[in-house]
Image: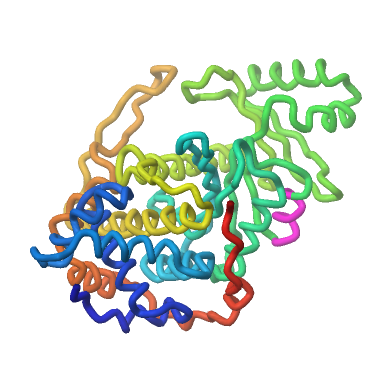
């Protein structure tokens, strides 16, 4: 099977052989063609991806199996994240967000915690992820470890960075870590989180404090109060919930004092939910994955995330020449119209990607032309991750 020379992107993967990178390109091209991560379906598209009608599908399948059996998967996934950073200008991104997606393969829980940046055009870009070998929420140690890994390689800009997180991502150690790293934060809270702290400050019982907050929100549209977290001044915010959820009030903790800024900024967090939809049911069908080993699941998630980023890069390029038509709908209160794109940026980009990129050679050429910045990446930090993980039983 003849595949193109990949020396030009080898600098992004200094610890892996050329054959591994060729298999990566072949896998990504087959995913773009077939919209799935199922290897049995992908091998059937290799003839199209390589323009070789006589290709042996079983040999292709064997190559894919060897690819997922590589050593140092964690390093390879970080390298994919670093390559993504050269495709999108992460230096202009002032927002980070993280969230989980989970499903089951038989009786095995697949639980992926992803963290990435939000582009100025309100599109989430995944950088790295980790697999939680359990069901349910991440704990503070797991998310702190993932954040530290991102910050170790992500070129942090000079301006203030804000992390947006849902109700799962709470805890004193987590908040302390964000404060210590000078990361601004807007974290949504569950109903009773920090109510005892506020009740003590206001000299009320927790029940009376909660009623007091709701009364203030109904009167003013919001409630805000200072809240001391381990000696650091933060703010507790409550507002009316304008989404279609059953909850009437939404609660936040943040180091930002402006209520309007908190609400407007937190809405950007929804972009990671759109990302999960686009790599699953609405895009590359990540749930078709038939592997249960955590390392292999992580690798598959990063490969699919890379394919997603290519579609976004193409979508951004397309709207420069032909803006996406806008539609509108009335908000929940039916008081004003809300504009939205008639077609998602991902769909526009992915449809054009299928037209532009037919073979692995086209894919390699597209990647090289899409790289925005030629940075001198410091791969010495990766040596810490070079020891292969112990395989799960």
The quadrant the N terminus occupies is: bottom left
- Relative image position of residue 138 (x, y in whole percent): 64, 43
| Magenta stretch contains residue 177 | yes
- Relative image position of residue 285 (x, y in whole percent): 33, 43
Q: Main secondary structure of the magenta part?
A: helix
Q: From which residue to which does the magenta span run? A: 174-181
Q: Is residue 310 left or right of residue 261?
A: left
In front of the other: 371 or 221: 371
Residue, x 51% and y 59% (percent of image)?
Answer: 128
In front of the other: 260 or 360: 360
Question: Can residue 36 be seen in this snapshot?
Answer: yes
Question: Can residue 119 be seen in this snapshot?
Answer: no
Q: Is residue 320 left or right of residue 227?
A: left
- Relative image position of residue 309 (x, y in whole percent): 35, 57
Residue, x 54% and y 81% (percent of image)?
Answer: 378
Above or below, comparing residue 53 to residue 304 in the picture:
below
- Relative image position of residue 297 (x, y in whole percent): 47, 52
Residue, x 53% and y 80% (percent of image)?
Answer: 379
């Amino acid at each position: 099977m003849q595949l193109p020379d990949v020396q030009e992107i080898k600098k992004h993967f200094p610890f892996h052989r050329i054959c591994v990178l060729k298999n990566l390109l072949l896998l990504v091209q087959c995913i773009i063609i077939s919209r799935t991560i199922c290897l049995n379906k992908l091998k059937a598209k290799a003839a199209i991806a390589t323009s070789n009608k006589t290709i042996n599908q079983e040999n292709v399948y064997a190559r894919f199996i060897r690819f997922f059996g590589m050593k140092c998967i964690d390093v390879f996934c970080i390298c994919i994240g670093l390559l993504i950073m050269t495709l999108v200008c992460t230096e202009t991104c002032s927002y980070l967000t993280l969230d989980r997606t989970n499903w089951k393969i038989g009786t095995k829980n697949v639980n992926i915690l992803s963290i990435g940046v939000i582009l100025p055009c309100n599109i989430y870009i995944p950088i790295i992820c980790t697999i939680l070998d359990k069901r349910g929420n991440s704990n503070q140690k797991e998310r702190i470890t993932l954040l530290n890994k991102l910050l170790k390689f992500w070129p942090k800009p000079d301006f203030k960075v804000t992390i947006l997180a849902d109700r799962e991502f709470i805890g004193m150690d987590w908040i302390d870590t964000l404060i210590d790293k000078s990361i601004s934060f807007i974290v949504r809270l569950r109903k009773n989180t920090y109510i005892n702290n506020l009740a003590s400050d206001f000299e009320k019982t927790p029940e009376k404090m909660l009623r007091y907050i709701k009364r203030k929100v109904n009167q003013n549209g919001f409630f805000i109060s200072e809240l001391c977290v381990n000696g650091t001044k933060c703010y507790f915010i409550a507002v009316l919930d304008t989404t279609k959820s059953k909850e009437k009030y939404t609660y936040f903790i943040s180091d930002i004092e402006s209520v309007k800024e908190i609400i407007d900024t937190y809405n950007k967090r929804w972009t990671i939910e759109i990302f999960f939809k686009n790599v699953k049911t609405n895009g590359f069908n990540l749930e078709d994955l038939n592997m249960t080993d955590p390392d292999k699941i992580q690798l598959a998630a990063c490969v699919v995330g890379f394919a997603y980023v290519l579609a976004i890069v193409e979508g951004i390029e397309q709207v420069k020449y032909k803006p996406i038509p806008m539609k509108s709908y009335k908000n929940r209160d039916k008081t004003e119209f809300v504009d939205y794109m008639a077609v998602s940026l991902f769909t526009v980009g992915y449809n054009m990607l299928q037209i532009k990129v037919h073979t692995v050679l086209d894919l390699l050429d597209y990647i090289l032309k899409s790289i925005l910045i030629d940075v001198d990446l410091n791969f010495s930090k990766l040596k810490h991750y070079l020891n292969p993980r112990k395989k799960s039983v």
